[in-house]
Image: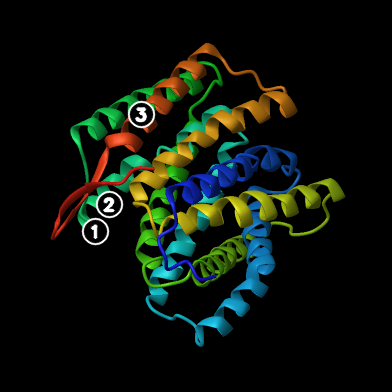
Amino acid sequence: MNDSRQPSRLRIAVVLSFGLLAISSGSVLVRFSQEAPTLTIAFYRLALAALFLSPFYWADRRRQGEAQRDSPGLVVAAGLALALHFAFWFASLRYTSVAVSVLLVYTAPIPVAVISYFWFGERLTRWGVAGFLVTFSGSALLVYNDLEVEGGGLGALLSVVGGAAFAVYLVLGRRLRQGRTLLQYVVPTYAAAALFLGAAVVLSGLPLTGFESSTYASMVLLAVFPQCLGHTSYNWSLRFLSATLVSLLVLAEPVVASALAYWLLGEPVTGLIWLGGVLVGSGIWMVATRGTRLETAQGAYVETL
């Protein structure tokens, strides 16, 4: 896939919108797969995604003439971060609602902004800082909801840790996408994550087989839609947008995921969750419109859609 040319804003918006629809099905499909252990579900998602994308990866290698082997250590680190993201996030779905879990796991913009400040020189404007504060206040309400309504904070804690791992994954992806095509980044990264998760499954003595056919079907759908289509579309955009902006845009997922959970799982969305969601969404809009800038030798510019 030759993606070296800057695409139009419309193309970026269409790709990210399609990716949002695909990735939002992930939390519901995890619920449908919960006959299997959390690490097993995560392993199948990443391993199958790497397998399904591998023919495109090898075709891309032939077009490029040779594999892009720069920064293999960063690929391994990105794979580890992705493995931890899914391990903690999938675990959180056993202890809290889809709405709370997805909203909190995508608080990644907070650590992304801190890391990107030191690594890429990406800075927040005052408008962006205000947006982060609004997003943080919404997240605090969701944690409070988890403590008061769900009866414990373990699900919220696991979601936040999963979000921190996702932030590291996004920042590493931003760095790696500058020197690799999309396929030569995502396939090795997904494969590395699958290896970490597979090792964790084996060392933990967890099963990889013996599940109902519906569980296997859900795990295959997890690999195809949220991973191959959803996550890959976000990784594609990292070549053209800042890591901070991409991490903020994916926060739109909880709205779609919560609607799917209400429709397919019958999970209610309380008033407190709605309020927290509105605050989080408002923070997204504030930062995505005028919230980030990149300092360059020629000056500063704001990266928005």
Q: Quadrant of residue 47?
A: bottom right
Q: Are marks 1 and 2 in contact (CB under 8 Å)?
A: yes
Amino acid type assigned to the residue bearing label 3 in the image: Gly
How crowded pointer 3 is (Cα within 10 Å; few <14, some 14-19, many 20+) is rated as many
Residue 270 in sight in this render: yes
- Residue at 27% x, 52% y is 116
- Residue at 50% x, 51% y is 11
Q: Which mark is residue 119?
A: 1
Q: Quadrant of residue 108?
A: top left
Between disc 3 and disc 1, the foreground one is 3
User: Which of 12 and 171 lies nearest the eye of the viewer?
Assistant: 12
**Residue bearing mark 2:** 115
Q: CA distance from mark 3 to mark 2?
A: 19 Å
**Residue bearing mark 3:** 283
Q: CA distance from mark 1 to mark 2?
A: 6 Å
Q: Is residue 277 left or right of residue 207?
A: left
Mark closest to the chain's N terminus, 3 or 1:
1
Q: Secondary structure at mark 2?
A: helix
Amino acid type assigned to the residue bearing label 1 in the image: Trp
Measured as percent of width and height from the top left, residue 68 is found at 45, 80
User: Which of 118 and 20 lies nearest the eye of the viewer?
Assistant: 20
Q: Secondary structure at mark 1?
A: helix
- Residue at 41% x, 44% y is 247
